[in-house]
Image: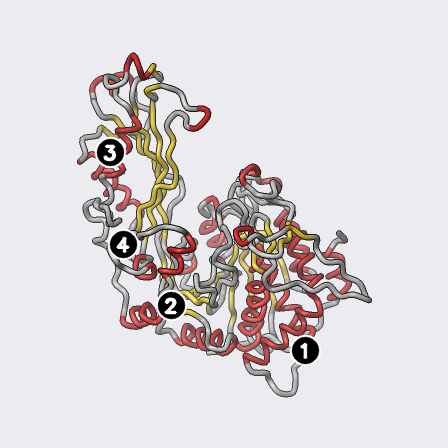
Amino acid sequence: MRNIVVTLLIAFLPYPAFAQKSTPPSPAQLAQEVREYRMDNEDRIIRELSEFLSIPNIASDTPNIQKNAAHLVEMLEARGIETHLLPISGRGPVVFGKLIAPEAKRTVIFYAHYDGQPVDPSAWTDGKPFEPVLRDAAIEAGGKRMLFPENSAQHRAVYNDNWRIYARSASDDKSPIVALLAAIDALRAKKIPLAVNLKLVLEGEEEAGSPNLQRTLLLHENLLGGDLLITGDGPVHQSGRPLVFFGNRGILGFEITTFGPIRALHSGHYGNWAPNPGFELARLLSSMKSDDGRVLIDGFYDDVVPLGNTEKKALEEMPNNDADLEKELQFAKPEGGGKRLVELLQLPSLNIRGLRSAYVGEQAQNIVPEKAEAALDVRLVKGEDPDKKFEQVLAHIRKQGFYVTSAPPTREERLSNPHVVRVVKDVWNYRASRTSMELSVSKALVQLVQDTTGGSAVVAPTLGGSVPMYIFEDLGLPWIGVPIVNYDNHQHSSDENLRLGHFWRGMEIYGAILADLNW
């Protein structure tokens, strides 16, 4: 595979100013112009994405994260984008880019992250998360592995909309970055000027909780002047339709450990006498939620900032595809006491993200385990403070009769207290954020995306996932989410993938925003 960055440098340097077409195109025409460019350049675009995906990017793998940052610098500079690395000691830098449009009066900042979640290669169908694989459909639909099409002067490579690329960060978040850059290429090739100045903030620690992002941005606050921030993080709506969202939930993570005997014991000799930490943990966790999924922790819903009338109207207009999702995900009854998924996303949630106590399956042993562990996360909504929420959790655990410690319990603590639990809060956690849907820029962006997509976009007050947008809110920047990847992308899991039809449509949406957003 030849180096796509060299190809771009040859194609685009020096990078001239955008030339104005005689009549500015409509959003639908802009989408068509980007589409035509894409159809002529699919091979180059996919090769650029594949090269980017081939660089391992686990957030804790600093050497490879730094390689990703260096590669991003090459990709941006090949387009004539002024680029700076905002350093973070011992970690991957924030990649900052700036592209000025001479006639633009507004500045849009695009945020995405280039790091990815940890991988377990054995859980991936193809076994190699950083070697992009092309399939003719989703694996669940029987998609077969195929070679990337050959491209030549005699036979142009063509990619079907339903084909999927499988690799870590294929959807979260490398493809939105490449889609934005490809949209810039398309506008340049079609001689369509940018309507806005563009800045890019590309982070390498988002999957580790963005522990250094706020401090780094404050140190370089002079670079961040802008009128709007757009994030490409997240999937489109579960209906497959484009999505514009105005809020995301914050996050609080913590781990709970219950304790039995100081060492594992023979279950025949000691069962029903030695306390079993698995049962202790199960009873504690079951006390936290009702059968219909309502969280039973005192005060859990008290600080939720209610939605306004505009947000409530948007919720009512969102597609109701819950029944289809239940069939796809194969469960008979959802939680939530009859509320729709989109309604529940406006509330804080409590989730068990992992459980462990001794062994199961072929490794199962007839023992009373010495401990049981659970990892939980709370998704926070607007108005909630992570520290206060954690205190509510601790109060609930104490109410169940547990002695709570944040350190491994001492011998004295174990002997003095019949129910001992260790609770440790994750190092990173942050609050939710939401932009008003009543702002002029909010209305303008929604209208532009609707005009670009034939009125098919879904508008949501809050997305379910967590991204540290509160940082930009604190900097006085309104922000709006415009994700482009398929909802069934296995984000954060094995077999992460990107459906190419969504990627192509994302290019068109981003192209229209760059060329026609004004308010």
Which structural element holds mark 3? helix
Q: Check disc 1: other Cα within 10 Å, few if <14, some if 14-19, many if 20+.
A: some
Pick the front one: 132 or 448: 132
Q: Which residue is mark 1?
A: 191
- Residue type at mark 3 is Arg
| Circle 2/circle 4 CB separation < 8 Å | no
- Residue type at mark 2 is Pro
Mark closer to the observer (1, 2): 2
Which structural element holds mark 1? loop
| Circle 1/circle 2 CB separation < 8 Å | no
- Residue type at mark 1 is Lys
Note whether 12 is above or below 388 in the view shown: below
Picture coordinates of residue 57 (x, y %)?
58, 45
Q: CA distance from mark 1 to mark 3?
A: 65 Å
Q: Which residue is mark 4?
A: 336
In the rendered structure, which disc, 3 or 2, sits on the residue that comes first in sequence? 3
In the rendered structure, which disc, 1 or 2, sits on the residue that comes first in sequence? 1
Mark closer to the observer (1, 3): 3
Residue 394 visible somewhere in the drawing: yes
Picture coordinates of residue 368 (x, y %)?
32, 20
The label shown at residue 319 is: 2
- Residue type at mark 4 is Gly
Residue, x 40% and y 57% (percent of image)? 325
Residue, x 52% and y 51% (percent of image)? 140
Q: CA distance from mark 1 to mark 4?
A: 51 Å
* Quadrant of the image occupied by residue 352: top left
Residue, x 55% and y 64% (percent of image)? 502
The label shown at residue 283 is: 3
